[in-house]
């Protein structure tokens, strides 16, 4: 497959951000500049890609290569981050490609509902909050509270087994309570909220069990509130082995379900 | 837009310095969220390698999530379609245990 296509990263209101926003941004094809393709009130953040790399079939070959995938996915994110904070944007999912510039313009005309989405997202960013439990610290804190089994011998063995079960139950219950409380309280600072499945430890790379993996759509005035809620939660939960991780600002990936038709 | 977060709160790399965002966070967003609008070239993101990644991301604890009232798999087309028999069986068992008899799972197929 030869020729080129246009890869679209997202959509912004036309005329709000200059093309200079993407100066120096490296797209999914590092040799092509990232530009704005405008039609009416909307503009697509786009760059040319070679169909030798991104053509149907070709791209699916490359999806098997984790290094390729990571590079391209991070490039997609980096391009959107260049615009984040400079203008409102609707992030596209990875791999939206058109045959030519005219087809990109047609997409903009056919999806007029993107204007309403941009309006809803105006000035908003996404923040991610993840909550983790250090299970050893949780156990130690519980022992300090006097829940440890004592003694030796067969009876002590059974008692110890029972204590282990109780510890596991208490840990699961505690994670659930923390997740619910954190999500409810953080949601009050947000326009919208999503609880996604927690990542497993081998994915998160963190030395604890993730119990919360949430995203919040935040107006500028809500950002301070998120930080203060998190600080307050952490001061109460941390003695039991809990910590929270704030990520972002992100493009509002979690808040752009298709809402037209 | 105004007032970006101070850099100390920006774990991902956007505002220079700091560590890059965790790959899992970026993959989850760029591959699994974001608006889906049809392009001219169809990329099948349900490709087998991606299924593996998605599984690693998504298969946390379904029972925990249900306990917390978070039924994330209900709306996930990937899980609803059932790319992995073991996972679907597990969800079905959970639903049966919860008295749902796995009916919704069947209907979505």
Image (cartoon, coloured by chain):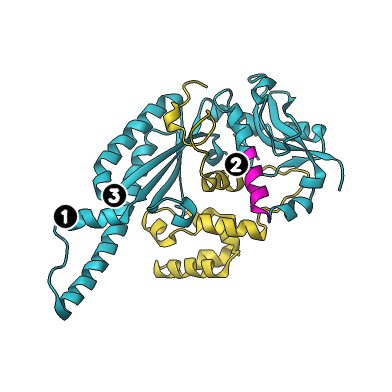
Q: How many marks?
A: 3
Residue sitting at x 57%, y 60%: B80
Give me the C-alpha separation between circle 1 and circle 3.
13 Å
* Residue of label 1: A144
Within-10-Å neighbours for mark 3: few <14, some 14–19, many 20+: some
Q: Spatial distance from mark 2 to mark 3, Cα to Cα?
A: 33 Å
Residue at the spot x=80%, y=32% of the render? A101
Query: Residue A186 in the image: x percent, y percent?
Result: 37, 38
Chain B tint in image? yellow
Q: Nearer the viewer, residue A43 or B7?
A: B7
A159 with respect to A223 (left or right): left
Residue tagged 2: B34
**Along the polypeptide, which appears first: circle 1 or circle 3?**
1
Q: Is A70 part of what is drawn in magenta?
A: yes
Q: Residue at x 36, y 29 (%)?
A: A225
Q: Quadrant of residue A97?
A: top right
* Mark 2, secondary structure of its residue: loop
Residue indicated by mark 3: A241
Q: Is residue B9 magenta?
A: no
Question: Could you tell me if residue A260 is visible in this image?
Answer: no
Is label 3 in a helix, a strand or a loop? loop
Q: Are marks 2 and 1 in contact (CB under 8 Å)?
A: no
Main secondary structure along the magenta-highlighted residues: helix
- Residue A237 in picture, x, y percent from top left: 27, 45
Q: Relative to A43, does residue A155 appear above or below in the rendering?
A: below
């Amino acid at each position: 497959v030869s020729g080129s296509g246009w890869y679209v990263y997202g959509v912004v209101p036309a005329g709000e951000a200059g093309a200079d926003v993407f100066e120096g941004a490296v797209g999914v094809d590092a040799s092509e500049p990232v530009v704005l393709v405008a039609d009416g009130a909307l503009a697509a953040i786009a760059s040319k890609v070679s169909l030798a790399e991104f053509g149907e079939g070709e791209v699916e070959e490359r999806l098997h290569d984790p290094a390729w995938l990571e590079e391209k996915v991070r490039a997609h994110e980096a391009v959107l981050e260049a615009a984040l904070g400079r203008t409102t944007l609707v992030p596209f999912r990875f791999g939206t490609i058109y045959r030519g510039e005219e087809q990109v313009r047609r997409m903009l005309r056919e999806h007029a509902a993107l204007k309403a989405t941009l309006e809803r997202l105006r000035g908003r960013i996404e923040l991610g909050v993840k909550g983790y439990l250090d299970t050893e610290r949780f156990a130690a804190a519980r022992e300090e509270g006097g829940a440890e089994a004592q003694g030796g011998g067969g009876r002590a063995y059974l008692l110890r087994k029972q204590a282990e079960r109780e510890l596991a139950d208490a840990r699961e219950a505690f994670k659930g309570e923390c997740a619910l409380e954190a999500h409810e309280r953080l949601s009050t600072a947000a326009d919208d909220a999503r609880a996604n499945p927690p990542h497993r430890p081998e994915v998160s790379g963190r030395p604890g069990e993730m119990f919360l993996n949430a995203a919040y759509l935040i107006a500028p005035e809500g950002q301070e509130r998120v930080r203060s809620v998190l600080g307050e939660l952490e001061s109460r939960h941390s003695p039991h082995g809990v910590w929270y991780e704030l990520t972002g600002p992100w493009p509002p990936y979690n808040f752009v379900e298709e809402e037209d038709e | 837009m105004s007032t970006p977060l101070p850099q100390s709160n920006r774990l991902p790399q956007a505002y220079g310095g700091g560590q890059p965002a965790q790959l899992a966070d970026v993959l989850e967003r760029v591959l699994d969220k974001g608006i889906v609008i049809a392009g001219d070239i169809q990329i099948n993101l349900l490709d087998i390698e991606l299924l593996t990644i998605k599984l690693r991301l998504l298969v946390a604890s379904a029972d925990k999530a249900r306990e917390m009232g978070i039924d994330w798999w209900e709306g996930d087309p990937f899980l609803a379609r059932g790319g992995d028999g073991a996972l679907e069986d597990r969800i079905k068992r959970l639903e049966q245990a919860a008295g749902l008899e796995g009916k919704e799972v069947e209907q979505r197929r």
